Image (cartoon, grey):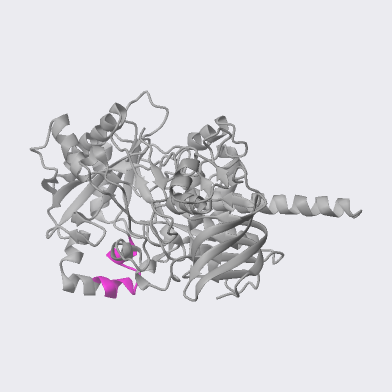
Amino acid sequence: MVEDNAEFDFIVSGAGSAGCAVAARLSESGRYSVLLLEAGPRDTNPWIHIPLGYAKIYTDARVNWKFQSEPVEALDGRRLYLPRGRVLGGTSSINGTIYMRGQPRDYDGWRQRGLEGWDWASVLPYFLKAEDNERGADELHGTGGPLRVSDVPERWPLPSAIIKAAIQAGIPYNPDFNGPVQEGVGFYQFTASRNRRWSAARAYLKPAARRTGLTVVTGAQARRLILSGGRATGIEYQSPAGIRHARARREIVVSGGAFGSPHLLQLSGIGPGDLLRRMGVEVEVDLPGVGSHLRDHFNTYLVYRCSRHVTMNDLANSLPRRLLAGARYLFGKGPLTNTGISAGLFTRSDPRLEGPDIQINMFLWSAKERSPDRVVAHPYSCFSFSPVHLAPDCTGTVRMASPDPLAPPAISYEFLRSEYDRRAILFGMRLCRRIAGQPALADWNLGEIEPGIVCDSDEELLADVRQRGIGNHHPAGTCRMGNASDSVTDARLRVHGIDGLRVADASIMPSIVAGNTNAPSIMIGEKAAAMILEDAQQSAGHVRTEEGGDA
């Protein structure tokens, strides 16, 4: 704990993928004092650090916000389960660890929106700065950074057979999804090292633990920003000792993620004026874009019965197998060393597209039930294909549902509302079936369980998607960068209309990237810290010049 009303140069709210990078880099020189606030606990839960352990913490309220969406009309009115990390490292401590940057054209598209410094050539150095890739350094990969990136520890026979089947189905082999091209099929890389998860907390906070200039407070949920004279001057947060406050001499950085960041801004009077007034919150800055433009990828699952007892289902359903897996893990071997998502592919639902809009994840497990309370595996061997639509037309919103700062926000999605969205997910499902039917999987595949071959027409498949489709847990865009009236930050991540306040996380993405969002969020944290330090140095130089010193 820190004293009430303690003062720091910088305050970072949220110790997720971006927040850890921001706090660590700002405190690196020892020149500035930094307070990092995290609502959840420290990352001491052992399941966090075992790669396959993410199945254990997927519904664990001790480290997971366990959000739920509002009913989604096009998904038969279902509420979607939305896991988000509530622990040091944020969602990087509970995710599937896939390391994916997206496509260069994603970032070049940001620059085309007028966001200088966000094109591929400008963001690549921050990816490289963060990365320590076991494959070594080249023009597209970095070494020596805090974030360990590794290949799958064991290339088991089933994922290899799936990759071969995809090649037989016409998908080219790709040895590196973060290389010159993204399209193709192959093994993923992961944020892991020596069979241990390498979260943002492990990458950035552990090396910084002994810095006197960095103070990390857990169990500290932000309640509101303190604003004075058009400037963010502090933060109010809930702690085990009650409500406390901290003051910022220079800046506050909000890194609460695509759900948490807009919610905190709204609680602080920054957001859509009509919403704030309806909630009884005084309007400090009427910014209609706060909480708007929510984007996410969309996916469903096809499940196949496996002829051999080599899947994670066999592990979940057998105590002897679990004990053996635990013993093997002590020697760096076996299923616990991997998340069960070894391989995947990227392709286009329409050959006229400029880049892939479909990702298919290949799972060595299946689940007959997924809910906020539990995940239950099928009672027999299965593997799954998950077609993911990377560029859905739909948007959503994050809105404060109560003036109570500890109440969750209302999160709304509009999946499957466009013809393109429906056509793309159908393409992905039929491609999965084509792959499953190739000769390479003939000895593995005992038949499709879900949705089942009786579900064949477009109408039948879409009806199944409405019953089982979900968001892909990659929310973005709710505090998006831009110069338009519905944007929230400028290209330097400064919140419009308030001095001393920035947002740094996936919420600032003006459009969602084509792929997993953890690595891009860390890149955003790296770039945010660099811009903050650059502005601080320029400010100090300006002050010295005014005082008659050297600039």
Q: Is residue 490 left or right of residue 51?
A: right
Furthest residue to the left?
A: 454
Quadrant assignment, res 329: bottom left
Describe residue 165's horizontal placement relative to residue 131 as left or right.
left
- Return the residue nearer the eye: 227 or 371: 227
What residue sits 65% from the left and 49% below the top?
230
Which residue is at a point 49% across and 34% down the rendered structure image? 105
Where, quadrant-wise, is the N terminus in this rendering?
Answer: bottom right
Give the left or right position of residue 541, taking residue 377 as reference. right
Q: Is residue 139 visible?
A: no
Q: Give x and y (percent) for residue 514.
A: 41, 39
Instruction: Confirm whether the magenta stretch covers residue 122.
Output: no
- Going by the picture, which residue comes out furthest to the top? 352
Is 311 positioned to the left or the right of 57 in the image? Answer: left
Q: Position of residue 118 (x, y in %)?
A: 58, 39
Magenta-tinted stretch: 325-338
Across and down, in percent, residue 404 comes to: 42, 59
- Viewer-proximal residue among 84 and 259: 259
Q: Is residue 474 visible?
A: yes
Q: Is residue 139 above or below residue 220?
A: above
